[in-house]
Structures are given as C-alpha cells and as structure tokens.
Image (spheres, grey):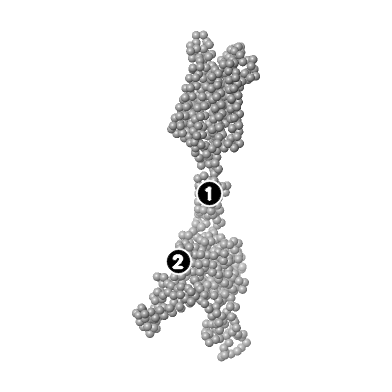
Amino acid sequence: MVPNEALQYQGIVQLLQRFGWKWVGLVTLDDEGGERFLQTMEPMLSQNGICSEFTRRLQANWQFFDFADTVKLTLSYLPIFLKKVTVVVMYGENMTILWLTGLILITTIIHLTHHEYSGTISAGKVWITTAQIDFISHILLKAVNMQMFHGAISFTIHSKEPPGFQEFLQGINPSGAKADGFITDVREQAFECPIPHSDSPRDNIKSCTGQETLQSLTSPFFEMSMTGHSYSIYNAVYAVAHTLYSTYISPFNQRAMAEMRGLAAQHMEPWQLHSLIQKISFNNSAGGEIMFNERGELAGGFDVTNLITFPNNSYIRVKVGRLDPHAPPGEELTIAEDKINWQRNLTQVPPLSLCNDPCHPGYSKEKKEGDKFCCYECTPCPDGMFSNQNDMETCVNCPEGHYPNKFQGECIPKIPNFLAFEEALAIISISSGLLLSLITALVLGIFIRQRDTAMVKANNRSLTYILLISLLLCFFCSFLFIGKPKKVTCLLRQTAFGIVFSVSLSTILAKTVSVVLAFMATKPGSRMRQWVGKRLAYSIVLSCSNIQASICALWLAMSPPFPDVDMTSMTEQIVLLCNEGSILMFYCVLGYMGLLAIVSFNVAFLARKLPDSFNEAKFITFSLLVFCSVWVSFVPTYLSTQGKYMVAVEIFSILASSAGLLSCIFFPKCYIIVVRPELNNRQHLMRRKT
C-alpha cells in the first residue's frame, strides 16, 4: 500500500541536488532495512556528486544495564550533532525518531557534564526523513524540545482527506454506544483522566468529564489531519472491500466467485486475497485513484512536507512539494521553496551543506589527497583562463577575441589595436611627416629657383631634384602606416617604402660616385674622363632602383601582404596588422636597402678627404652614418614591440632616416644659398684647401 522505495531514494537525491547540498550525514537504525538503505543510497549519492560526512547506525534496541556502556555508546553518536554538516538524512521507522530524541536528551546531559567533549552541539540542521518515519515520541519530545526538528523536510505517502473526516473526529464520544476500548485508552492517556463508568468506584481521582476535545491535544500526541500512514490503512481497507465486492458481483468471473465462496466457507486467509487485490483499481471517497503496478506496488508518489513547530511543542506539516513517478525523467520532484520554513538557528536560507566553501569564479577545484571527492581546495585560474561559475572543475580558455578580466571570472571582448588617425602617436607622426615634407618641398623650391647658381650646378642638379623628390615621397610613405589596415595600404606600405628609399639611396650612390670620378678625372692622363657624365649617374639610379622594384614585384606575385588579426600576442587587445605574407621577402627588401646604404657609405667615406672647399662626399658620409644608425637600431626595436607601437617604430625610422639625409646633405647647401650667397660662385667652389 506504499509506493516503491526506489522512487523515494531518487527523490532524496533530487532534493539534495535542488539545494546544492553535497555534504550530508546519514542516520539509520542498525538493522537489515538500514543496511539495505545505505547500500542503495551511498552509490546513488556518489554518482550524483554528493558525499556523506558520516554514517551512523543507531542501535535498534538499547539496553540500559550498564551506565558506562550507555555513555560510551551515546558518545559514539556525538558526531551527528558536533559535525559541521548541515543536512542529515534519516531512514528507519518511528523508532528512529524515538531513539534520536532520547539520544539528544542524553547527549545534551553528557555534553554539559563532561568537559572533554566541549564541541558545540549544532541545532541548525536540516533533517530529511523518509516516509516510514513519523514524529510520534510525545514524551521524549516534550523533554528535549520539539524545536530541534523545526524545518524538517519529510517524504510522506501521498494523502487526501476524505469528506467528513474532521466531523468524524470531533464526534467521537468515549462514553457513547459506539465507543470502544481503543478510544477510551487514547482519551485517558491524552487527557490524563479515567473515563467514568457506572460500575467503577468513585474516588478522589479526577475523572474525564467527556467534554474534552481531540482538537486541544498537541500534534505529537494526536494529529487531526489525515496522515500518509492513516491514508494507507484507509485505502487498504477499501482495497480489500472493493476486491471482495467486485469478485462477488462480477458476472464474468464465475470461477473466481466459486473460489471465493469456497474460501469463505473454509475461513479464508488474508494472503489468499493478494493476487486479486493487485488487479483492482478504484477511486476512494477522497477523490484519489488507487491502482497497482505490475509488481503489485501502489502506483503513486510521495508528498514532500515541511515540519513547523510551535512553542507548546505542537506542530503542523505543510505540503511543499510532490514526488511524481509519472513526471518526465529528472522532473519527478517539484518543490515550492517559498513555502518552506527553515530551522530558526540557520544563518543562511536555504542553507549550505558543503565540505568546504565553494570555489568562486576565477578559481577551479583541486582535489585534496586522502579526502572524499566533495572536499577540495580552490586554486586560481592560470593566466589567460577563466571560470565564471562556482565550483568549476577546470578553468577554460576565453572564446577567440576575448580575454579574462582582472579576477578571471568572466571574459571581456578584446579591443582592436591599430594606429588610428585620432591617436596622439598618429597625430605626432602625421604632423612630423607634414612638417618634413614641407621643408623638403621648400628646399626643392630653393634649388629650382637657384638652378643656375654654382652651388646647384656643382652637384648634378638632376640627381639633386630626384633625391629631393624621393625624400618627399619617403615622408609621404609614412602616412600609409597610419589607420586601420586595408588591402590596398597593406600592398603599398612596404613595397612603396622600399622602392622610394632605394631610389634615394641609389641617387646618393650615384652622386658619390660622380664626385669620386670627377676628382679622379682631373689627374693628367686619367682614363676616367669617359665615365664622367650624367649617363653613368642615371644608369646607377635606374639599375639599383630596378633591382629593388623586381624584388617587390616578386614579393607581390608570390606572397603579397594582406590585412590580418593577431589574437595571441597581446592579452587584452586584438592587433589589426598587415601580415607581410613572406617575412623572407620583407627582410630581402630591408637587406637590399642596407646594402645600398653600406656601399654608398664606403664610397663616400673614401672620398671625404678630397681637397675641395665644398666636398659633398663629406656630408653624404654623415647622412649615411645617421641613416645606418637609425635602421640598425630599428631591427631589434621592431622585433621587441607589438601592435601599433611596432608600426610607430617603423614610421619613426622612416622619418628619422629621411630627415637625416635631408639635413646632412642639403642644409649646408641651403645655408650658403640663402645666408651666404657671396660664397655661391665657381671660384669659391673650385678653391682647394691650403
């Protein structure tokens, strides 16, 4: 007449999971039923990530022959109250509560009288009881205070109250015609007064008046509601009645009728009805459907009730949930949390029942050696990983394009990183480039305006114009590195910069070679006269520039640069960059420019002491020294920076090296042309040093 116990075990596990209780205590009677409960329950708890801090088997029958043995036995149960576990699951029968209340009473006395047991008895516990247990120990509960069990959550057999049940209870009269010995005994014990009888002698003992009402009794002694146990008895009686009735009136069950009539004549035994009862189904007067499954078990569920106690040790049980076997898997248990009254001594509701404090976001669980799996330590997540929930087993990497916050509890989208036009670094670079471009254009204008003077003619004004224009383009090239990388700018950045700089260096090399050849041609009988002229200079510029242009064309054909994103280099930012495509080709372009610069520097260095009042090779040497210094320091700096600062380093190198060439080569000439025009004549330029 009760549902299968396996459903109740499943409901206990779901209840523990519902409130996140992973550290519980188990209390049962030390008998066959209790052992079966532990063998079934403990594996289920482990499979669902729940551990038991302790398992206590209460002795089924205490024998108080030796006080010392009683104390020793009682002390073995102290962990039930001293352990920090908040949730205790009790299994057994009504005697479990009886012994537990007695244990509370004795434990309290021992705890007060034995100083060596100085732990604090915790009253703030949530007791979870099975359907077999009822709070019936009226006398002991009076002694230890029923408040200990306030807030208990119980699984009870599903019950409904039949119509007229309350009126029936209120109309029971112990002295009426329908009175029986049971009712009389109950009233005498409840009200502590004998029922008066006409044949009993009258004495000074206070007799019951007959006006006492059951409603005035406290709940532990007599409940006025239909409990699950009473409901089971009620349905059992009607199941037998319906079985007998349906057997006798059914015209389609003649064989069963004959069998039942024969049994009735032979004083039928109860077990002989079992096979017939299992096939019966009916609706009782309370509106409940009673039917049995194929195993002969009641096909019903359980109610979840919450025990609410009062100062006079009375209590009520409030239905707060339902355990329905016909619900979808995982949803058998429904709980109305807002209806639950929790134990008054709890500091938090719903309470926590864990082996240790949960690991907060930003931490992961690490198992403690030698402890149960529910006990663990919390370790911070490694760099670059996060955990955004409590008690995560492991930290995980953020999705692409995100990074963990300071506490590693959530992921934040990365900020795009590129040298935007509105940034201070970009504004400085643009301003510097424009200023240097303006100065270069001004110098070019001066040389064009003074194109017929000796100073301009002396150094091959065509090469001078080419050099100034290429330097102007170098300053403009720096603008390609600013802004969000796009396909066109990525293709032009390094190639345009490489070709324009190669033209500048080729022009400087041509000017230097022209100076050396001019001085060598002045020697008597020199064959260098045939090499002196514009044709050789132009050939040097074209051939050296074409080599660089060919390298760039090969680069664009094989593996051209393209816009790309770098998710890993910087923790909090996404680097928007131009992927060079082929790093080898990129360094070939830089290497070729370095080769031109070194060759030009060596030629200019050898010609620096030529006996001329204005030796351009000397200024070219200084300019190339600045150029080489800038680009030699560029490589390690470029490789050690990231994101927009890498771009800024290249822009600085372009501007600094170009400015070095411009200032060292042309400022001395501009000084003479603008400030000292009297020196801008052929006689001064041809005058040899003393």
Viewer-nearest residue: 521 or 53: 521
The residue shown at (45%, 29%) is: 553
Q: Position of residue 257 (x, y in %)?
A: 37, 81
Q: Residue at x 41, y 72 (%)?
A: 296
Q: Quadrant of residue 573?
A: top right
Q: CA distance from mark 2 to mark 1?
A: 41 Å
> Residue 326 got which mark?
2
Q: Which mark is residue 301?
A: none
Q: Position of residue 515 (x, y in %)?
A: 54, 16
Who's the residue at 52% across and 77% down the image? 163
* Number of other residues with Cα within 10 Å of mark 2, as a class: few under 14, some 14 to 19, many 20 or more: few
Pointer 1: what residue? 386
Residue occupying the far bottom of the picture: 199
Residue 377 appears in the rendering: no
The three-letter code of the residue at mark 1 reads Phe
Q: Is residue 237 left or right of residue 360?
A: left
**Number of residues whose C-alpha sits closer than 10 Å to that of mark 1, classed few (under 14), some (14–19) or many (20 or more):** many
Q: Amino acid at mark 2?
A: His
Q: Secondary structure at mark 2?
A: loop
Q: Secondary structure at mark 1?
A: strand
